[in-house]
Image: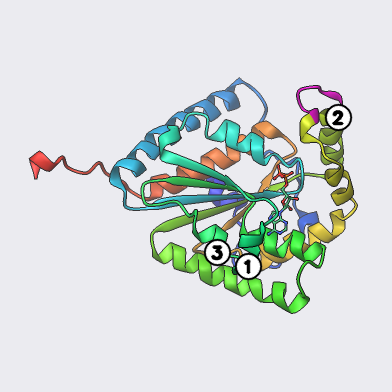
Amino acid sequence: MDFSRKLMVPPDKTIKLGKFDPADTLAHDNDQKTEAKLEKTIKRLDDLQYLLYAEKKRALLIVLQGMDAAGKDGTIRHVMSGVNPQGCSVTSFKVPNSEELAHDFLWRIHKVVPEKGMIGIFNRSHYEDVLVVRVHNLVPKEVWKARYDEINRFERNLEENDVKILKFFLHISREEQESRFRERLHDPCKKWKFSKADASERKHWDDYVSAYEAVLSRCGTEYAPWFIIPSDHKWFRNLAISRIIVETLEEFDMHFPKSPESS
Ligand code: ADP
């Protein structure tokens, strides 16, 4: 199955998230067959990452966004589990500090874009500047409104400089978020992850849905596509994301460079 084609947001399409089922599994079952497929995909990802690293012709940038508890951390843990840590970097974007705020919003992002040969993962990203910033009116409307085009220009520039960008929206239902919050509160190993801010952000669910719909409708481009990943089932989320990464790397048609002696 071609996961990329099935889950990619078509460029210039107006997205209504209500039309996307967060519990969809594209007819997959949570069985041994699927587990074997995931294992095989993760092994393949390791091989392809090695090749990307050896070739050093391109970088891959993976952007993860989603509501609180959508599974950004879990995705990184599972999907990248087989990948050599030397070939990838993970950056988590928090509330900007004073130095970051003194620059344009893309400054802190551009600095950590992966170099050729590397896979870079963004846990949250420049999209926060049209998500949390829009929901909480952290800058005037005309400022965040201009950012969709600025983001598209920035991403096009990266693409023209051999950075392939894949953007994943981890789509969960409100009910699933509530059950994950509850789990966090009751599991001593997960309690640390729950913050009061999570509960207060939940009140803004509908505003976040509108903000995400704008992002998916305006910034889903051919050169930097968005994928809506049904994420109520963690096993399916992991399978879908790892398959899309593998499908993308396979399209690169990479080869090991010749050794200096043989040239
Ligand atoms: P996470 O929820 O990603 O595991 P935190 O609990 O530390 O990690 O949350 C990071 C917080 O930083 C989030 O509330 C997010 O909305 C916020 N944040 C990230 N980027 C920005 C930004 N550009 N402006 C304001 N807040 C931001």
Residue named by callout 1:
102
Tell me, for residue 185, which label it has, or none.
2
Out of 222 and 91, give the one closest to the viewer: 91
- Which residue shows up at 29% across the image and 46% down it? 55
Give the position of the C terminus as an image quadrant: top left
**Magenta segment: does it hold 186?**
yes
> Does the image show residue 1?
no
Out of 169 and 150, give the one closest to the viewer: 150
Looking at the rendered image, the disc whose residue lies closer to the viewer, 2 or 3, is 3
On the image, the x and y values in percent for residue 76 come to 59, 37
> Does the image show residue 118?
yes
**Magenta segment: does it hold 53?**
no
Residue flagged by tag 1: what amino acid is it? Ala
Find the magenta span and give its range.
185-191
Judge left or right: residue 109 versus residue 67.
Answer: left
Element type where label 3 sits in the image? helix
Residue flagged by tag 3: what amino acid is it? Trp
Looking at the rendered image, the disc whose residue lies closer to the viewer, 2 or 1, is 1
Quarter-of-image position of residue 135: bottom right
Q: Earlier in the sequence, mark 1 or mark 3?
A: 1
Out of 138 and 231, give the one closest to the viewer: 138
- Which residue shows up at 87% across the image and 38% down it? 178
Looking at the rendered image, the disc whose residue lies closer to the viewer, 1 or 3, is 1
